[in-house]
């Protein structure tokens, strides 16, 4: 049955991506960290599990359009304490959306975390002209492995971005003189008078690769709701999870990662076959992480209700009811496995927090 859930590599964006990088150059994650423009606020996070955390500045904490989802902890060359958080945008009344973005957070000074938003984009060529396109995915889970950002694409599979590929879009003189006319806050692509526009974002991260979900025969298609990448058991794996309400499937699937490329490992037949499929997992799962030999899963219980933490392994989870703040989403572990980070989504109650995995090894708490 695992063969029904293979991942199939699609042609990389190399031609158009190379044109973009050749024209503008790369600033990478370090470039964004040197140009942060917003302040987060350390705060006490509700719930029994959070150890420490912060919330966003008012405009982002209460924003009714952009919703935080995924969280991951990348390693940086200079040793800074960095988090990435993904967001998706609700569509407007005309069905339009700017797509998805990540937020780069620097917590090197925990008393004054700072951050900046970076728009996820795709590259294409139309009539020979290089274009930028939005990435309209839910981005319910993200994970950095070997410098590559894996992003869950609910119905399509997995998209991959290289954090070194972050590009800064030059700001033109007209943008400074007439920001309401020239900043391009409503458009994405190539400007008529030269340069690029991306809904007013200064930094964009272009997609490099993608892995399409195979269409299963005789089984329900997997929803790629969230994911994590890193050490699992004896090897490096990509673990994908599925959010499911009552009456829906709720599954976890394990895939092998190539230790050289850090991408899903593709066999000679051009497929990345699943290593394991776990049916009937906790309902309403939102994120998964593996730390110190145990699996951790978040589950939401509706807006305003505390979230649940499930600890153990597929088929043998223990539920810790209501120990998380309302709206818990994705999870990721620090490199040493001593902390697990999580983000929440509801406007006005948006937190990014960590928990201590050693505190949740026992049986269910009532």
Image (spheres, rainbow, N blue to C red):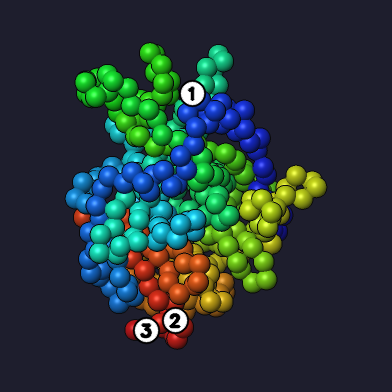
Q: Nearer the viewer, mark 3 or mark 2?
A: 2
Badge 3 local density, few (<14 within 10 Å), some, or many (20+)? few
* Residue 27 location (% of width, % of height): 46, 39
- Residue 195, position as x, y percentages in the image: 41, 21
Residue in the image at 39% along x and 44% along y: 32
Using the image, determine if residue 144 lies above or below residue 89.
below
Left or right relative to 14: residue 58 = left
Picture coordinates of residue 358, whole percent (x, y): 44, 81
Helix, strand or loop status at disc 3: loop
- Label 2 element class: helix
The residue mark sitting in front, 1 or 3, is 1
Q: Are marks 1 and 2 in contact (CB under 8 Å)?
A: no
Query: Could you tell me how far apart the alpha carbons at marks 1 and 3 are, in whole angstroms?
Result: 53 Å
Q: Which mark is residue 71?
A: none
Position of residue 40 relative to residue 318, above or below, is above
Counting from the top left corner in percent of width and height, residue 149 is at 52, 49
Mark pair 3, 2: CA separation: 15 Å
- State the residue at coordinates (29%, 31%): 93
Residue 274 visible in the shown view: no
Label whose residue precedes the other's in the sequence (1 or 3) = 1
The answer to whether 143 appears left or right of 349 in the picture is right
Mark 2 packing: few (<14 Cα in 10 Å), some, or many (20+)? few
Q: Which mark is residue 131?
A: 1
From this view, report whether residue 332 is shown above or below residue 4.
below
* Residue on which the image places disc 2: 358
Could you say which is closer to the camera, residue 326 or residue 356? 356
Quadrant of the rendered image containing residue 310: bottom left
Q: Earlier in the sequence, mark 3 or mark 2?
A: 2
Is the Cβ of the residue at disc 3 closer than 8 Å to that at disc 2?
no
Residue at mark 1 to residue at mark 2: CA–CA distance: 48 Å
**Residue under pointer 3:** 365
């Amino acid at each position: 049955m695992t063969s029904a859930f293979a991942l199939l590599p699609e042609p990389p964006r190399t031609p158009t991506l190379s044109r973009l990088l050749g024209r503008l150059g790369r600033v990478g994650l370090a470039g964004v960290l040197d140009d942060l423009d917003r302040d987060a606020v350390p705060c006490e996070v509700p719930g029994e599990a959070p150890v420490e955390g912060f919330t966003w500045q008012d405009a982002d904490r209460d924003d009714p359009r952009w919703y935080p989802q995924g969280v991951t902890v990348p390693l940086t060359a200079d040793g800074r304490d960095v988090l990435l958080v993904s967001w998706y945008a609700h569509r407007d009344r005309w069905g339009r959306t700017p797509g998805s973005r990540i937020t780069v957070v620097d917590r090197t000074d925990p008393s004054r975390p700072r951050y900046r938003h970076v728009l996820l984009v795709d590259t294409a060529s139309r009539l020979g002209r290089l274009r930028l396109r939005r990435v309209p995915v839910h981005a319910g889970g993200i994970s950095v492995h070997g410098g590559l950002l894996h992003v869950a694409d609910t119905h399509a599979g997995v998209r991959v971005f290289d954090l070194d590929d972050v590009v800064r879009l030059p700001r033109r003189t007209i943008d400074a003189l007439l920001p309401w006319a020239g900043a391009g806050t409503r458009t994405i692509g190539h400007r008529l008078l030269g340069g690029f526009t991306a809904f007013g974002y200064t930094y964009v991260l272009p997609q490099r690769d993608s892995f399409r979900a195979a269409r299963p025969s005789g089984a329900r298609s997997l929803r790629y709701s969230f994911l994590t990448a890193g050490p699992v058991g004896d090897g490096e794996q990509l673990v994908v999870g599925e959010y499911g309400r009552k009456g829906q499937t709720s599954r976890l699937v394990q895939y092998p990662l190539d230790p050289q490329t850090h991408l899903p490992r593709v066999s000679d037949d051009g497929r990345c076959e699943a290593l394991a499929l776990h049916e009937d997992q906790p309902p309403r799962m939102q994120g998964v992480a593996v730390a110190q030999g145990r699996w951790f899963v978040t589950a939401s219980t509706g807006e305003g209700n505390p979230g649940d933490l499930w600890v153990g392994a597929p088929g043998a989870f223990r539920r810790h009811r209501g120990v998380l703040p309302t709206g818990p989403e994705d999870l990721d572990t620090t490199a040493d496995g001593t902390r697990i980070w999580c983000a929440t989504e509801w406007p006005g109650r948006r937190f990014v927090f960590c928990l201590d995995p050693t505190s949740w090894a026992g049986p269910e708490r009532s």
